[in-house]
Image (spheres, helix red, strand yellow):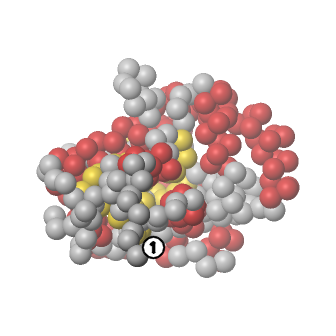
Amino acid sequence: MSLKPIPSDHPSWPSHAKTGLLLVNLGTPDGTDKKSMRRYLKQFLSDGRVIEVPKLLWWVILNGIILNVRPKKSGEAYDRIWLHDEEDGSPLRKYTRLQAEALTERFGTRDDLVVDYAMRYGNPSIPDRLDALQKAGCNRFVIIPLYPQYAAATTATVNDEVFHWALKQRWQPAIRTAPPWHDHPDYINALAASFEAHVTDKKPDHLVVSFHGIPQRYFVKGDPYHCHCMKTARLLREKLDWPSENYTVSFQSRFGPEPWLQPYTDKTLEALGEAGTDSLAIMAPGFAADCLETLEELAMEGEEIFHESGGKDFQYVPCLNDSAEGLDLIETIARENLAGWVSV
């Protein structure tokens, strides 16, 4: 029995394995206007991993209240940090793009690897970039959620979106997802080097390490995020040889009336100012790139709270972004997760 010839419209695939490496960050609106903010917030806050509330109840709250009030307020906050003269607009999109471009340059021109980036919420979207990688001939994917500490509301929802895309594929590619790197020696070294590079004049009296918060009940239900954050903070303190009495781990960006992980960053800054702390530095190790929560909430609002409470010298230490230390770390994570598929 002879085989029929391949149809002319049959999809063409490479004869060798080609791997797509996708860096994924949380997300960003397309602009700071009300329409863009509403679209972004609706996608973000409709995710059941982010808001674990009965769907019908949350639908009423989200569409009846939040999406009618929050877009204007959030847009004003984004406007304070928006890169109005740059095509990216969003600092988070800019730095994530630069990270992907730097990896491409570091790995060099090759026919077995394509590097790209995406946002879980907003653009460029995960499905769009996976489609593009597949069209480029990739039949293996390595997904790196850019969250050092695992949380269901961050890492898991990236993986959810990737596998939701895979559900629709006739020929599914092989997929790897990078594990968290909260205690990776290169990560801790990069954080310490970044701190020392930005705090050069005088050692501050106090160092605050702020992580994005999650509701306390998520932790009680088994989310390892708090444990990952505390281990990162401990290892960083030991690396910096910082006295524990002048070192505080806090959690920011709480939303809604229920208790979140504590102590809260804003309350911590207020208390330190009232206690007469002259100088303070703050950094956010859980963010791979600067964004609204770091540039506006910490560097701007945080400084205002500290000064209004009596504090004097306030210094925000930027995220790793596209610094040499940050890019070295992402390259290391990429190499470890490409191992066996791509020799880099």
Q: Please name the residue shown 25% across and 44% down the image.
A: 101
Nearest the viewer among 210 and 219 is 219
Q: Residues within 10 Å of mark 1 (few under 14, many from 20)?
A: many
Q: Please name the residue shown 41% across and 40% down the image.
A: 93
Q: Please name the residue shown 74% across and 38% down the image.
A: 67
* Circle 1: residue type: His
**Most extreme residue toward the top, as rendered?**
85
Mark 1 highlights which residue? Answer: 228
Disc 1 element: helix
Nearest the viewer among 227 and 58 is 58
**Most extreme residue toward the front, as rendered?**
1
Task: State whether residue 52 is above or below residue 281.
Answer: below
Q: Quadrant of residue 140?
A: bottom left
Task: State whether residue 330 is above or below residue 302.
Answer: below
Left or right of 256 on screen, residue 171: left
Q: Please name the residue shown 30% across and 70% down the image.
A: 337
Q: How many marks?
A: 1
Q: Is residue 81 among the parts visible in the rendering?
A: yes
Q: Position of residue 43 (x, y in %)?
A: 64, 45
Q: Quadrant of residue 215?
A: bottom right
Nearest the viewer among 283 and 314 is 283
Q: Quadrant of the N terminus?
A: bottom left
Q: Quadrant of the C terminus?
A: bottom left
Q: Is residue 320 among the parts visible in the rendering?
A: no
Q: Position of residue 253 (x, y in %)?
A: 58, 51
Nearest the viewer among 93 and 311 is 93
Q: Position of residue 198 (x, y in %)?
A: 24, 47
Task: State whether residue 225 is above or below residue 195.
Answer: below
